[in-house]
Every structure is written in structure tokens, then in C-alpha cells.
Amino acid sequence: MKIKTISRSSDTYVPVKNTQESSLPRNLNPALHPFERAREYTRALQATKLERMFAQPFLGQLGDGHRDGVYALAKNHVATNQVASASGDGVVKYWNLTDRLETASFKAHYGMVSGVCVHDSRLFTCGDDKTVKVWSVSAEDFDTRVNDDEVYGASGAGKASGGLIKTFVGEHSFKGIDHHRDEGLFVTGGAAIQLWDINRSKYISNLSWGCDNVNAVKFNQSETNIIASTGSDNSIVLYDIRTNTPVHKAVTSLRNNALCFNPMEPFNFASACDDTNAYSWDMRKMEKPKKVHKGHVAPVMSVDYSPTGQELVTGSWDKTIRIFPALDGRSRDVYHTKRMQRVSVVMFTMDSKYILSGSEDTSVRVWRARSDQRSAVKSARERAKLEYDEKLKERYQHMPEIKRISKHRHLPKVVKKAEEIRRNSSKNK
């Protein structure tokens, strides 16, 4: 039997050892590298597996939480590490995210706190006791902790100089509050939508348009004259405060629980609905939603856009948090813990790196927006490697194996079972 072999001298391709000669030249022409795609696919698969291995979204909770369920969260738009939370027992806490400890805590209302927002160094709260209260949360004026109805200094001795600034008394219980970005105006919901001036004791305008009760109200932070509201009649209504009139009304199948405007695209906003979906809307075309965000198996109670406007987060009574790309109907990640109960409110931080959630188990939890990313300082080489891996995962995201690994999530048994029931029922139809 004759065997043909290829023989060549090693001197033509092995560099001489222990010399200062440069290594052999490398030709980067893709046509001359037939295995480039295979090598990149292997690297993309490895990067996807490492992403799932290092996915640890939950960081911890803020302080000791509340004594009742957390139903409202608000962020300070001029600071990245300051947020406020409100609970069902009328207590409002102001937090420092850097050390996860409370800067201030006070008994704001008798009964449930239904709305809270922060503007500059002032905190606005509203509740079931028919009052709206304005508090100072300035670092110089209000570095305090509160016990019951008394306000004490941070060391526990002496009464603080800051605290309650002003109280507005209404005719009904309030169900939501939001402040104008530039002017001294704020809007409240409830039995009616009322526009208030911070310098007046009575509301200056009533914007209601045929709704029994208003669940949520929001100012547009870019087009600051636009207000959106959701009502118990399953409606979403847009108002213009320049003319004090409603502009447009859309009716959905079930009630909407929350609203949020896209900070980068003023004409887009999202709503959280009782039909287990979140909806993206274009205020220029309100005939139907722009995108339906599916995945939850229980009513969606809260929705919030990231400061970049590229993603939105939702919280639901199915005890999970989902993160959606703004233009995608399927969530890219699902967060849950064994102890977390029904989620009432969710929120992105101002640097879009973290997510806060308030639930009925009295806790305010902190999550990573990207479950595999860490906040430690990275070298230039490490940053380049991470960017390279992201591009590879994006390039090969539709390959079956990579797609299966990147989309796989462990869900609670109740949620998984509900998804199967819904899937089977849709097939039977």
C-alpha cells in the first residue's frame, strides 16, 4: 500500500528560539482564515455560559425596610443615590443608596401613603387622609431619623430643624402625585385630577374628564405641559395644562395601574395593566398600543423606564420583576426570590445600573439591571474583553444553542405552571 505524505522543513515556519527576531507575520484576510467563524462561535457560546454562571441580580434590601407593605417609590432626579419609599402604615423613608441606610423617616399620613415624588430638596406625599404634605429632605436641613410622630436628630437627641414645610387639605383621598419638572406645580389624582400651585392653598384647576377614580398621574418630563392619567374606567387620558383641557382618551380592556413616560422620547409612554401585560403607547397614535410586553401571569402593578429610554421594568403580583427592551415584547430577564411577595412598585435608579422594588413583605430590594455585571473598577484589557464578548453574543444570538442558554430562566413553580396553562389554552383556541 502506498501512502502519500507532505513533508516540509520546520525551519520555514518555526521561529528560531532565543533570538530577537520578530514573530511570523499574520495575515488578517478573512478569506484566508476558514475557521474564523467557528472560533468566534465557540467564544460566543463560552461568553453566554459565563454570563449565566455569574448572574447574581439580587444585591440586598435597604436598611430594615418598613413595618407595612411598600406601595410607592420615588427617585431624586438630581442625585443618583437618593430615593424615597412609602408604606401602608403612613411612614415615609428617605434612603441613601450608597450605604443602603435611611437618611430620614417620618410618619407622614394617617392611613396609607398612596403617592410620593421628589423635586429638588422637597418631598411631596399624599395619602388616604385627604392631605398633601411637603417635606424638606435637604442634607443641610434634614439629616434626621423619626420615631413614631416625633422628629429627632440623627443621634437621637434634640429636635431636628427640618421636616414638614406645608400641608394641603383636599376634598377627597388622593391616589397619586407628580411634580412639574421646572415650575412650582404638582398634580394629584383620586376622585378628580387637580392641578396645584405650591404657593396656593387650594387647587388651581380641575382636569377630570368623566372618570370615577384616578389611579395614577404623571407629568411628561420633556413636554412638561402634558399630563397622563389612568382611571378606574379602564381609560388612559392625556391633558394639556396650557388649555386646562383633556387632549385624548384611550380605553383598554382592563384597568391600568401605573404610567411612565420615556425620558428620551417624550411622545412614548408605558402603562401597566391588570390583564398581565404592559403596553407601550405613542401619544400621536392612541388608537392601539405600539407594543405589548408579555410574560407576567398576574396583574402588572408598576412600570418604569430606564433613564436611557432603552429598557423598561415591570413589577407584578406574580411575585416577579421583568426587564423588557423598549422595542421588544419578550422580557430579557426575570428576577425573583423565595421570600419576595407581591410586587407593588418598581423603579430604575438615575444611573440605570440598578433597580429598586417594593413589595408587600415590607422590603425595598436592590437589584442589578444587568445580572452578570459588577460595579468594580475594570482594567482597559478587561473592558475590551467584555465589549468583544457582547458583540459576539449579539452576532450569534440566533444560533439555537446560544439562544437556548441565554433565554433559560428558573421560575417559581406557580409562575411556570400558570405559563403552561396559558400556553395550552391558547393552543386549544
Image (cartoon, rainbow, N blue to C red):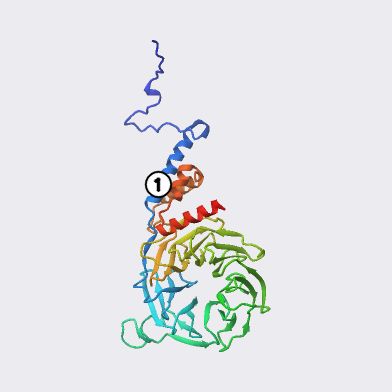
Residue 121 in view of the camera: no
Residue 117 picture location, percent across and down: 50, 76
| Tag 1: amino acid | Lys
Would you name the residue on which mark 1 appears? 49
Q: Is residue 416 above or below residue 261?
A: above
Q: Is residue 419 above or below residue 45?
A: below
Residue 101 picture location, percent across and down: 36, 73
Residue 228, by quadrant, is bottom right
Residue 87, by quadrant, is bottom left
- The secondary structure type at the circle numbered 1 is helix
Q: Residue at x 48, y 78 (%)?
A: 114
Q: Nearer the viewer, residue 370 or 34?
A: 370
**Mark 1 crowd level (few <14, some 14–19, many ≥20, 10 Å Cα):** some
Q: Is residue 161 above or below residue 248?
A: below
Residue 150 in view of the camera: yes
| Horizontal side, residue 78 vs residue 249: left or right | left
Residue 350 picture location, percent across and down: 48, 67
Residue 290, by quadrant, is bottom right
Q: Residue furthest front?
A: 428
Q: Residue at x 41, y 71 (%)?
A: 360
Q: Residue at x 50, y 87 (%)?
A: 167
Q: Residue at x 46, y 44 (%)?
A: 402
